[in-house]
Amino acid sequence: MEAAYAITTDGLTKKFGDFIATNNITFQVKKGEIFGFLGANGAGKTTAMRMLCGLLKPSSGKATVAGYDVYTQTESIKLNIGYMSQRFSLYEDLTVSENIRFYGGIYGLTRSAIKTATAELLAKLALEKEAKSLVGSLPLGWKQKLSFSIAIIHNPAIVFLDEPTGGVDPITRRQFWDLIYEAAHAGVTVFVTTHYMDEAEYCDRVSIMVDGKIKALDTPAALKTTFGAATMNDVFLKLAREANQ
Amino acid sequence: MNPIVVQHISKQYKSVEALKDISFEVKAGELFGLIGPDGAGKTTLFRVLTTLLLADTGKAFVNGRDVVKDYKLIRREVGYMPGRFSLYQDLTVEENLKFFATIFNTSIKENYDLIRDIYVQIEPFKKRPAGKLSGGMKQKLALCCALVHKPEVLFLDEPTTGVDPVSRKEFWEMLQRLKSKGIAILVSTPYMDEANLCDQVALMQNGQLLQINTPKGVVDSFAQPMWAIRADNMYQLISTARAFEDTQSCYAFGDSLHITLTNGTAQEEALATYLKEKNPGLTMERIQPGIEDCFMYLMKN
Amino acid sequence: MKQFLQFLKKEFYHIFRDRRTLLILFGMPIVQIILFGFAITNEIHEAKFAVLDQSNDYYSTRLLQRFDHSAYFHRVKNLQSPNEIAKTFEEGDVKIVIVIPPQFGKTFFHERKSTIQLLADATDPNTATTLENYASSIINQYQKDITKEEKLPLTISTDYRLQYNPALKSVYMFVPGVMTLILMLVSAMMTSIAITREKELGTMEILLVSPLKPGLIIVGKVVPYIMLAFINAIIILVMGVFIFDMPIKGNLFLLLAECGLFVLTALSIGILISSITESQQTAMMISMVGLMMPTMLLSGFVFPIESMPLPLQIIANILPAKWFIIILKTIMLKGGGLMDVWKPTVILLGMTLVLQVISIRKFKIRLS
């Protein structure tokens, strides 16, 4: 049973002094699932994500990521996850292939493995001609796609994406989601936060966090039915409005 | 003359053409949206209009004044909210507002009625440093700072980027109220869904305006018939739909895929039969395209 | 005016809310003065010395007893021949060697004068000078006491030689040096960082789009640092005078006025740096490499200009710091008046004017 889940949390809580950033959250993410992690600014998404990535020690509660404990096995967690955020993407002053080599090296890929991975990755993104270009000279959309592909270069069990599509044009955004689908299809669990509510619809299941707590968790279709809303945007607004009253 | 008049503005940075022959006008009391992804040239255009950059060619007038010659006058009369909410992070909410009021030779009291609706929402936190506010609060404070001197023209560069949907919605409601006070507003955004809230939109890509129209006009100009398709396994559906030989475009939109065909409705039946075969639970319906569909269509052509 | 005052208020908020800036502003001068002051010129306790007593008579033994009883000295070795002196220094522990000539007592009484040789290790010149002073005063006292006892006018002259660093500079060098360094740091580096920070934050955009005159923005950013630099100058002077007995022989107002002039020079450099850089980091790097290092190394603060190769001596001339140190030394140590420092003052004034003209022309009313 345990093995069916990529992420499990049980009463996960993080306090900063008097402030409870993440309040007693419990959820499971199935293997190979695209899990949307939504919430307003300051709702505690980033804190929760950092705890799951092994960057922040929880105040209480349990959580495992890829079967490893977030208190004691953070090193193993880091080896088994990929991470990409809108802010952190790639080294702008290194070329495309240098970036790939660097990140491959960090995750202990062998030289030959990096070589094959580089060739595959460049072919998939149609970036062969740009292999020797500095990443800084690429358009934003290409950077984001490249960044995602590099985040999963070591075949992690789970990839965490923190607002990966901010500011990107609509076509690139779709192409980015094509990559996510493909990765999920290949068995990678995807844990993603986003501000685009239409993207929430692409997820298998979504959770919505309000003030440190998970207020709703289900498939997009079920959530829309429960809240009697036409779109995920309405679901989100209803939940957030409720919390304000 | 309209509050904002832009005539054939071009601007080049080294080898990059940031703006290519841009022309448009914004009327008093109009909310004009500049819609486009990062790197489209929106910020450059804002800087030209707020007198911070000189265009290579073309003319622009704000409040009837030339952006090159009368830059000093323009700087008194416009409100500008640059991207990334430029606030002093180490100053409190109140101190920030007071500072910006004073440098514009006014006080918070003088124009309080204009900012009241927004300020009451952040007032409980007025002793808090701006750096410790949430994104939505920062955005409201930045708007207050841009409004405190009662500008006649308001420039808002990506005011909703990185802000959650609730704050975004509230922000647009505030803009509607400001508009009713006769202020001309030029606002840029990467979010297509916000286009519908503007009176006029200009779709921008690679330094060019693809189309200037009302949101409804944009949608009406889209001549292609479009279908929304859905199935149990969406990943499977995307690959099969794209493999169909007459498929012109097929993109995910929320919980369905939007698909157009190369020859209009001629192959509708063929598509339905083809998809049904491979995708259990298929539904297919004719839909009215949205702004985002139009933008994607214009981008590709 | 109200705009300007509000601007100043904001600037002070920034300064007082940023602990790091505050630490640099007020911690640096104090720490530097203390470091330079105590590490280099602190009173010496139990300095190790060696003796080559070639006469070994009553009078030489009594003299050496005085050294032994002194809190400043601690005898570690008795040498047998002059050949051992070099080796003793090389071992590094011994800071000073006292050489008493053969038949010290005899020559003393027959010729009524004698000579004692003091050899000090001047790899650390300040310690060497201090030790030499202490040793001389012990010997002088001894000479007076004996003169009284014997009722005869007797003289012991000390022949003292500094080993390894003959061109020794004054101990008082560090107060003017630290003052120059700190004023440069506060004025040039802090202002350039403060201005580029606004560019980085994006607030410069709003300020430019506001009715504030660009000149006022610059003056507003600079005035707080003028005040802070001045406070710093006063802290350093007070510490120098009361803790390290640094004399101020000349006119205090002239001294402060010259400090004001140097602050302006440094500020002009800071403004110039900020107008050609976009980020705080670059501004800091340029200030560090372009200002701090030359000020430390080429202004005569650490290394005497006279002993530098000619090209460096020429470069030193374009450093405001060099001229300011000359002014400080002339006023503080020699008691010089305006007539004595008019030349470096005019040079500093000229530099300030040129820099201000350049930075005003460079300052942009737009972003590019």
Image (cartoon, coloured by chain):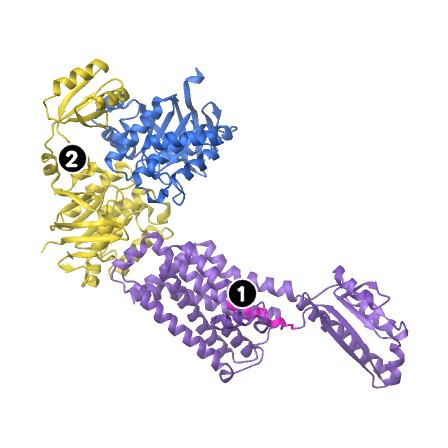
Q: For the C terminus of chain A, which image quadrant?
A: top left
Magenta residues? C167-181
Q: Quadrant of residue B222?
A: top left
State the residue at coordinates (22%, 55%).
Answer: B48
State the residue at coordinates (48%, 75%).
Answer: C256
Judging from the image, mark 2 belongs to the subunit labelled B
Instruction: Read off the residue under disc 2.
Output: B294
Q: In which quarter of the image is residue B257?
A: top left
Chain A, chosen colour in render: blue
Which element carries disc 2, helix, strand or loop?
Answer: helix
- Observer-nearest of A130 and C242: A130
Q: In this view, does C72 lie to the left or right of B199?
A: right
**Alpha-carbon neighbours of circle 2 within 10 Å: few (<14), some, or many (≥20)?**
many
Image x and y of residue C89, in percent = 76, 63
Amino acid type, callout 2? Cys
Chain B, chosen colour in render: yellow
Q: How far apart are marks 1 and 2 (CA)?
A: 64 Å
Outermost residue toward the front in this view:
A129
Amino acid type, callout 1? Met
State the residue at coordinates (47%, 76%).
Answer: C258
Image x and y of residue B2, in percent = 10, 54
State the mark number for residue C296: 1
